[in-house]
C-alpha cells in the first residue's frame, strides 16, 4: 500500500434519492429531507454541518419529486421581495442566506439501487479527488462538526476514514459495523466491515452513523461489488474492498447523534433542538410538564 498525496477536500455528497417510506404518510408528496426539526428542514442541518466543515460544493444525489430541496438552497425573489416590503427584513435575510449557503450540484439516481450506487452516481462530478459523504438521516450535534473531525484525520493520515460510534450489542443489526486493529482508543485500522450484522457475527460494536471521508478509489470498488444485503449495491461492501486496497480508518468522533430517520429519534432531536432555542425553551418545558402530568 502506498501513501498518496491528495488535494484538499472540496466536495461533499449527500445521498437524498430515497423514497422515505419509513416516514409515510408525511413523505407521500414531500421529500423526507424537507421535514423540519422545529422549523429547519433536516437537509439544512446536514448542509450546515458540511459548510461549517469548510465545504461549499455539495453533490446532491436526488430523484424525481425532490425539487423542493434545490429550491430551498436557492433565492426566492418573490418571497424575499414581499418580506422586505413588509419590513420583515430578518426573515428576508434568512431566506437569502440559504441561497448563498452552498453550490448545490444535483445528480439523479435514476434507479433505487442502494447507497453504494447513489455514491457512485457522484463519480463524474467528484472526479479524482477525495470527498466527504454525509447521510441525511443522521444529525450529529458537536462543537467541531463531525465531517470536519473526519477531514482533520484525513489530512493527518492521508487515507480514507469513516466516523463511528459505539452502540449496544442489540443495535449492531441497524448499521454498518467495522472491525480491525485499535491504533488508539478512538482510532481503528479497519480490516472488516459488515452491513447490518446479527449481534453474534458483528466484528465490534463500532457503528457507522453516516459520515465518511473517502479517496476516489472507492468508485472502482463500488463498480466492482455485487449487489449485497437487500439486492442493493452497499456502500459498506465497497468500503470492505477499499480496506483491502488502501488503509481505511474508523474514528470515534465527538458529538451526540440523533437518528432522525426513526420516529422516536426524530422526536428526540425535535425536543433537544427546541430546548436550546431561547424563545421556545420555557414554552417547551411547560408543554412537557403538561404531558407528563397527563400520564400520572
Ligand atoms: C445506511 C448504511 C449503514 C449505516 C447507516 C447509518 O443504512 O448502509 O452502513 O450504518 O446508513 O444511518 P440505512 O440506515 O440507510 O439502511
Image: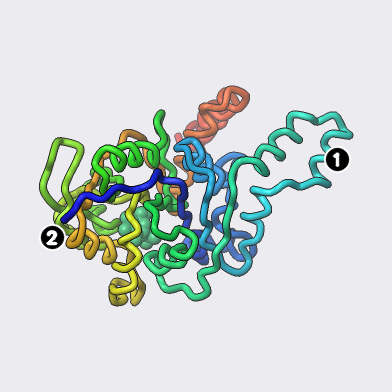
Q: Are marks 1 and 2 in contact (CB under 8 Å)?
A: no
Q: Is residue 76 left or right of residue 22?
A: right
Question: In which quadrant will I find the C terminus?
Answer: top left
Total marks in image: 2
Indicate the position of residue 205 as horizontal and vertical percent values: 19, 49
Indicate the position of residue 291 as horizontal and vertical percent values: 52, 35
Q: Is residue 57 left or right of residue 163?
A: right
Residue sitting at the far front? 5
Give the residue pinned by disc 2.
200
Which residue occupies the foreground of this view, 192 or 161? 161
Residue sitting at the far right? 85
Q: Is residue 4 left or right of residue 139?
A: left
Q: Residue 173 — which label?
A: none
The residue at 23%/55% (across/down) is 177
Q: Residue 82 — which label?
A: 1
Ligand 1 quarter of the rendering: bottom left
Q: Is residue 244 above or below residue 39?
A: below
Question: Around disc 2, counting alpha carbons within 10 Å, would you say few (fewer than 14), some (14 to 19), or many (20 or more)?
Answer: few
The residue at 33%/48% (across/down) is 6
The nearer-to-camera label among 1 and 2 is 1
Is label 2 in a helix, a strand or a loop?
loop
Indicate the position of residue 20 as horizontal and vertical percent values: 51, 62
Question: Around disc 1, counting alpha carbons within 10 Å, would you say few (fewer than 14), some (14 to 19), or many (20 or more)?
Answer: few
The residue at 52%/66% (across/down) is 19
Q: Is residue 47 above or below residue 274?
A: below
Answer with mark 1 or mark 2, whichever residue precedes in sequence: 1
Question: In which quadrant will I find the N terminus?
Answer: bottom left
Q: CA distance from mark 1 to mark 2?
A: 59 Å
Is label 1 in a helix, a strand or a loop?
helix
Which residue occupies the foreground of this view, 274 or 2? 2
Indicate the position of residue 141 as horizontal and vertical percent values: 42, 35
Q: Is residue 123 above or below residue 261?
A: below
Amino acid at each position: 500500500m502506498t501513501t498518496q498525496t491528495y488535494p484538499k477536500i472540496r466536495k461533499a455528497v449527500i445521498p437524498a434519492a430515497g423514497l422515505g417510506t419509513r416516514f409515510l404518510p408525511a413523505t407521500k408528496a414531500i421529500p423526507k429531507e424537507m421535514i423540519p426539526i422545529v422549523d429547519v428542514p433536516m437537509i439544512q442541518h446536514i448542509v450546515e454541518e458540511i459548510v461549517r466543515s469548510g465545504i461549499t460544493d455539495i453533490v446532491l444525489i436526488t430523484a424525481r419529486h425532490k425539487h423542493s430541496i434545490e429550491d430551498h438552497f436557492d433565492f426566492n425573489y418573490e418571497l424575499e421581495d414581499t418580506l422586505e416590503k413588509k419590513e420583515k427584513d430578518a426573515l428576508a435575510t434568512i431566506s437569502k442566506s440559504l441561497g448563498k449557503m452552498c453550490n448545490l450540484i444535483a445528480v439523479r439516481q435514476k434507479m433505487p439501487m442502494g447507497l453504494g450506487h447513489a455514491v457512485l452516481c457522484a463519480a463524474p462530478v467528484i472526479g479524482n479527488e477525495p470527498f466527504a459523504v454525509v447521510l441525511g438521516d443522521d444529525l450529529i450535534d458537536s462543537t467541531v462538526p463531525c465531517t470536519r473531525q473526519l477531514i482533520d484525520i484525513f489530512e493527518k493520515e492521508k487515507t480514507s476514514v469513516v466516523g463511528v460510534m459505539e452502540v449496544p450489542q442489540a443495535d449492531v443489526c441497524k448499521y454498518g459495523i467495522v472491525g480491525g486493529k485499535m491504533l488508539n482508543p478512538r482510532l481503528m485500522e479497519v480490516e472488516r466491515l459488515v452491513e447490518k450484522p446479527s449481534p453474534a457475527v458483528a466484528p465490534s460494536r463500532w457503528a457507522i452513523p453516516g459520515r465518511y471521508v473517502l479517496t476516489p478509489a472507492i468508485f472502482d470498488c463500488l463498480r466492482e461489488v455485487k449487489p449485497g444485503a437487500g439486492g442493493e449495491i452497499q456502500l459498506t461492501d465497497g468500503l470492505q474492498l477499499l480496506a483491502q486496497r488502501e488503509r481505511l480508518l474508523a474514528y470515534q468522533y465527538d458529538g451526540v447523534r440523533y437518528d432522525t430517520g426513526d420516529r422516536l429519534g426524530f422526536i428526540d432531536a425535535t425536543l433537544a433542538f427546541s430546548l436550546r432555542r431561547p424563545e421556545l425553551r420555557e414554552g417547551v418545558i411547560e408543554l412537557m410538564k403538561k404531558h407528563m402530568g397527563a400520564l400520572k
